[in-house]
Amino acid sequence: PEVRPCVLPPWSSKGPPPPPPPTHTHTHTHTSKNRMALARCTPLLSLLLVLLVPTVVLSVCGGASADAHMGCHSTTPVYGNPNMLPILEGASAMKLVANVSSGLAYQVTVPNFGGNTSQTFFLTHLWGSAYEQGYAHGQMLGKEAGQFMNTSWAYIEENIESALLPYVPEWLADAIAEYGLDLALDYVYDITKRFTSEDFYEEMHGMCDAAQVDFALARRVHMLPGVTKGACSMLGAWGKAVPGPDEHLLQLRALDWDMDGPFRDFAEVVVYHPESGNATQGHGWINIGMVGFIGALTGVSETQLGISEIGVSFPDSTWGPWNQTAIPIPGVPFIVLLRDILKFDQTIDDAISRMADAHRTCDLILGVGDGKMGYFRAFQYSPWVLNVQDPLNQMPLASWHPRIEDVVYYGMDWQCPSFNQVMAEQIQKTWGNITAPNSIRDITAVEQSGDNHLAYYDLTSMDIWVAFAAPHTSGGPTEAYHRQFTHFNAQSLFNVQHVQG
């Protein structure tokens, strides 16, 4: 169907009772202080904290993505230079760095331009139950996971007070900076936990147990994407848009997000090998992101599905009565929904049903490709609507966002003329010969999207190409779209057998 039935925002629905609290003993160091602070707060101040903190976290974490959103309505499109770097074969560039009972970890070295522009990322394989996968992850990369959690939290705390000052007096900014961040993200957790699959927190518990990372802190860091927006891009091309005769399905997911904080210092590709015979574990899938972050932003599944996502800052009237931006509402976090699509769904129809049935919490453009069916669809996803976008009905329809045969695409936002125009022009120039190497060279680098990381998936042959932003310790171009891509065959990654050394 072109339009699926809307699931209304569920704030009036009590739903099933929440699960009992976990028995794990991890506690955040500020928990008792926050309880006392919260007890002193009036209901009005509590409400103010919950409403304001997501807004300022968005301003702190917006970084380069905020700049990209602001550039959406520039009267002059900006064109970047093509990416002329050769593609690196990942299988020849990795070294085993850890081997435990349920996991393997490799370090992949990417030369880029040589010298100080070289960088590394982790390629990790995890086996077993959700808890065992998390525990193995923490055993192998616990130091890096802990650094990611702690530096991410410190970055938000250090910047939140200055970000608050445009909204509140200085005394209130001090109080919110000290108490409000924990409160707001714990509130997001409280209203989303009953919509979250149990394996998500089981895996997180396993990682925290092995790495000795504060579970409450890890949980709060995972709530951040739900109150921030990335100005990202997506593309699906198949049929006549790609070279014949096989007519592969090619999909793009470009992540444009904060570049000032530590998020670009912990790049990782994780391959999940579920417990054999355990239906609750789904099937194999690949998560492309950051060490210690187990929500899905970018990835593919063993069933030839791929995901893409864009945060919407510039909606139009088709999105519903109001634009959901900074007020958290009950529902499934999108990083969990995308993870469940990859982990459990067999077809794009399964993914559509999952989205239609979900209690949706925010305004996003989501993308799902299905290599078995041979096509890609984007989705106008909000608490109010779920509209399917295909080449014949792709919206918005404008001179800067024309419909292109056998292609669905979005550049940075729903209403973003400057980036969409550049993307459309580059797609039209490459149309009929859209491949990953050609797109890496001539589409995303010229559009200038994918500063934090980006990936192309050929969901027919199950090949993936990934690039990550320069960590703060590396030289050369900062943005991932101007750095060297690494190629892997996803099926070969799924076929890896674990032999403990």
Image (cartoon, rainbow, N blue to C red):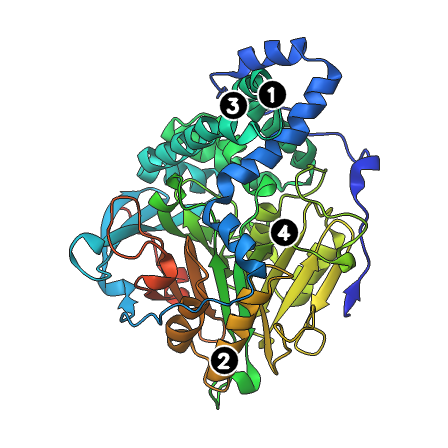
What is the spatial separation of the Cα atoms under label 3 and label 2, in whole angstroms? 47 Å
Q: Disc 1 designates what residue?
A: 169
Q: Looking at this rendering, what residue extends furthest in the left direction?
A: 115
Q: Residues within 10 Å of mark 4 (few under 14, many from 20)?
A: many
The answer to whether residue 308 is seen in the rendering is: no
Taking the spot 66% from the left edge, 39% from the top edge, the residue there is 326
Q: Amino acid at mark 4?
A: Ser
Q: Earlier in the sequence, mark 1 or mark 4?
A: 1
Task: Give coordinates of residue 316: x percent, y percent.
Answer: 73, 58
Q: Position of residue 280 (x, y in %)?
A: 59, 48
Give the SS element for disc 3: loop
The location of residue 21, given as percent across then percent down, is 62, 24
- Viewer-nearest of discs 2 and 4: 4
Residue 309 falls left or right of residue 463: right
Q: If you read the primary sequence from the N terminus, does the residue marked by circle 2 or circle 4 appear first?
A: 2
Asked if disc 4 and disc 3 are in contact, CB closer than 8 Å, the reply is no
Residue toward you, 75 or 306: 75
Q: Which type of secondary structure does the marked residue at label 4 adopt? A: loop
Residue drawn where x is 37% and y is 46% of the image: 264
Residue 180, visible in the rendered structure: yes
Amino acid found under the numbered disc labelled 3: His
Please state which amino acid type lies under the numbered disc 1.
Pro
The front one of 78 and 324 is: 78
Q: Check disc 3 and report the residue beneath it.
A: 24
Residue 313, x across and y down, in percent:
63, 51
> Residue beneath label 4, please?
313
Question: Mark 4 and mark 3: span between their CA atoms?
Answer: 38 Å
Name the residue that disc number 2 marks.
Answer: 248
The amino acid at mark 2 is: His
Residue at mark 1 to residue at mark 3: CA–CA distance: 39 Å
Closer to viewer: mark 2 or mark 1: 1
How dense is the environment of label 1, judged by Cα within 10 Å: few (below 14), some, or many (20 and up)? few
